[in-house]
Amino acid sequence: MIFAHARRTAGPAGAGEGTRAGEGARVDGLVDGFGRRFHYLRLSVTEVCNFRCTYCLPDGFRKTAPLTFLTPLECERVVRAFAGLGVSKVRVTGGEPSVRRDLPEIIARAASVPGIRKVCITTNGWNLGRQVAGWRDAGLTNLNVSIDSLDREGFRRITGHDRLPAVVAGLDRALELGLPVVKVNGVLLRDTAEAGFEAFADFVRARPVAVRFIELMRTGDNADFFADQHVPGARLTDWLTARGWTPRARAFDDGPAIEMVHPDHAGRIGLIAPYAPGFCDGCNRLRITARGQLRLCLFGELGVGLKDLLEADEPEALRARILRALAGKPAGHRLHEADSGDTRQLAQFGG
Ligand code: SAM
Ligand code: SF4
């Protein structure tokens, strides 16, 4: 039978993870029909982006509908609903989240929700040096910066912007500020593979950051690019293994990355391999789009609208709708069958 529920156990108010004062019960987590638990919410705050990454928005962002995205208060309401169901980690994403002027307020509101332990962001880092202190002060705990190439010209070719030095300076500023977790995301591309592995291994020799390569995913819009540029993740792990890197133990709320360490390097290098067997078995995240839809799978079809309940501030109805929707979460994506659902590019839903 397909079911979805928030598992509750009796316990003193304020006693457990996800417990809010006065609730009198401990929420152990959202669980779907396949026994997967969800404690991680990806919250997209905009579809707009100022970069033109070759695999995502090669022609740049095009407005096709009014830019009516969740307000900071609606973001807080949705985070509150999920935190009440056991979610403890929120990642703010987009489009490019930092194009929103009210981003510090969104971070602060998410961080203020009882039960939320980590407020993370994924950003292209275009203005990181100027913005990151404000995000830290607002309550940001984890920063992921997307850098696909450490070669200045390669970075410009991929993103459409000659901003590599500024992005790296912003990352170093974040390290100086002592943000608890700083990571780099890079998409694994045929054109940049081995030279990129070498450059990133050098990059993390002294920097205590985790670099995670994401295997290129096929979306509705990038079929030709995918056919040309997709390489299996084993190309990275084989390269690392041959040079003495070894796998590292995982924390309970880690994403799907397998990270590797080396005694001569302060940082780590990892792989997110969505095409690997069993990838979806460990799915631990749900997604909210910038328009207030709950997406059960990155490569699914449609979403469940929550915007009306967020506008009206109806927490009980919101919670009930989320639980009902979770019953429909599929076992896995169908990327292997070249089926990306209705996902044209990842800027649409935040990756
Ligand atoms: N604009 C922000 C950024 O680039 O970090 C946040 C949104 S972006 C959609 C989130 C992540 O998805 C980025 O790390 C990006 O590199 C990755 N991404 C986008 N399209 C992808 C694809 N087709 N395959 C793999 N990763 C992709
Ligand atoms: Fe923009 Fe991020 Fe997509 Fe690049 S990957 S185009 S930065 S949304």
Image (spheres, rainbow, N blue to C red):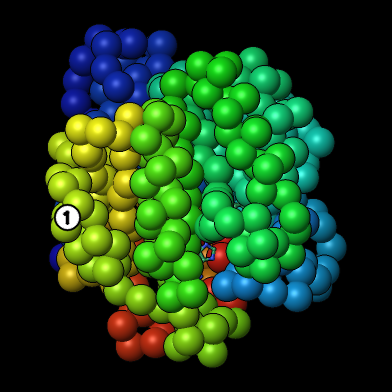
Image location (x, y in percent) of residue 289: 59, 55
Image location (x, y in percent) of residue 184: 48, 44
Image location (x, y in percent) of residue 250: 20, 38
Quarter placement of the N terminus = bottom left
Residue 344 visible in the displayed image = yes
Q: Tell me if 63 is positioned left or right of 35 in this view.
A: right
Q: Tell me if 120 is positioned left or right of 75 in this view.
A: left
- Residue 244 to residue 160: above or below: above
In this rendered view, identify the residue nearer to me: 97 or 234.
234
Q: Quadrant of ligand 1?
A: bottom right
Locate residue 38: give its quadrant.
top left
Give the total of numbered labels.
1
In this rendered view, identify the residue nearer to me: 25 or 112.
112
Q: Which residue is depicted at the point 42% across and 49% down? A: 200
Locate residue 12: give its quadrant.
top left
Q: Which residue is depicted at the point 80% across and 71% down? A: 62
In this rendered view, identify the residue nearer to me: 171 or 245.
245
